[in-house]
Image: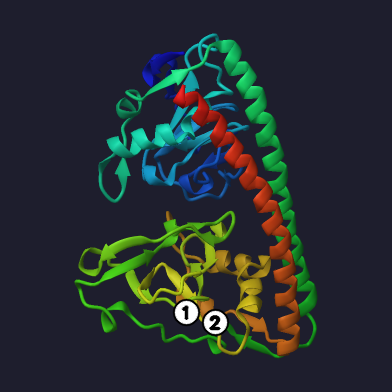
Amino acid sequence: MQIVKLKDVVMRVKDKIDKDNTDLEYYIGGEHIDSGEICITRKGKLEGSTIGPAFHMHFMPGDVLLMSRNPHLKKAGVVDFEGICSDVSYICRTKDESVLLQRYLPFIFQTNHFWQFVEENKKGGLPFFLNWSDFERYEFPLPNIEKQKELSDLLWSALDTKLSYIELLKQTDELVKSQFIEMFYDKGYPVKCIGDVIDKKITRVAKVFEKTDEIQYLDISSIDNSSKTVTGLTPHVLKDAPSRAQYVLKQGDILYSTVRPNLQNIAINPYSYGNVIGSTGFCVLRCLDVTTGYMWGVVNSVLFTNAMINKASGANYPAVTDKVVHAYEIPVPPLEEQNEFEQLIKQSDKSKFEIKNAIKKIDDMLVSIMKEIYNN
């Protein structure tokens, strides 16, 4: 099997387009690319967007977008539609289909071998990055074209199955959302503001920790907004931590990102550690007079999301304040009704757990196939 450099078989496409004078409908930002995923399945609408002038690169169906910033997030995926992205997303296309199949390319970018190279060659800091000339130096084993066809058919077949499971996860979430509205709205329950049913006094880090203490930082980049889960923590010595590292979190706190509410960056802190510190980019919802499950239903509802979008201010990074979140009015049903909804969530989570296990098996198979190639 021949060893090639990326620059010998892949080109960076630099087709430019004026975002304000185009018939194209969609754009892709870093928030639309899921970490470690082969396919980019989310996108934003150009019409009415607040994206900046850096969004002028034109991609086509089948192209692979490789994020040059924050390489630890492992963002590189293939698109199946036409649109624009920013100039920090490198548009990758094979130079010659008889040497490297375009449909094989995205699997190369999602190997441990590739991301290890990226980690070893990153530059700068906060955010780290690689230039295209850095990526071009990547060396990897390339099977012959017949083997690529065979592997591509196998890999894409498995991936299609995975995407079907992911769609089932989305449908399960949508069912829970619709049930929430049906159970609690227009039922005559008393109405209160969110701020009236939560603990608004979240302890600040300086009151608990010394500057030399180690903290575990949880910010917006720690959240996968497709699964609405926390993906990890970043350790810091407090004196070196970002200035936004302020809130001392408790297990079960709902973290609602107040920036770009349309993206629904929401998660529950799963950690019981005493040194988990949240960003001030979150509105922390620590429930007192309602259950966490019920509040989770509130902040994930279409009604809440639309209300926050309508009240957001700012051009490039529209955001709401904690005060706006706290002022949002919600029905407060009896506790037994809230508990009934929590049981629905638990049943939904069981179903999702089984689906996620099936997805993991597919992911493990994909990794195993590519690992075998790189070990040969």
Q: Residue at x 56, y 23 (%)?
A: 104
Q: Secondary structure at mark 1?
A: helix
Above or below, comparing residue 281 to residue 192 in the picture: above
Q: Position of residue 4 (x, y in %)?
A: 39, 16
* 1 and 2 marks in contact (CB < 8 Å): yes
343 and 92: which is toward the camera: 343
Label disc, if present, on residue 323 of the rendered structure? 1
Q: How far apart are the alpha carbons under marks 1 and 2?
A: 6 Å
Mark 2 — residue? 327
Q: Secondary structure at mark 2?
A: helix
Q: Which mark is residue 95?
A: none
Q: How is the image coloured?
A: rainbow
Provide residue 255's location: percent of width, then percent of height.
49, 70
Vertical arrangement, residue 96 with respect to residue 213, above or below? above
Q: Amino acid at mark 1?
A: Lys
- Residue 282 at x, y = what percent? 44, 69
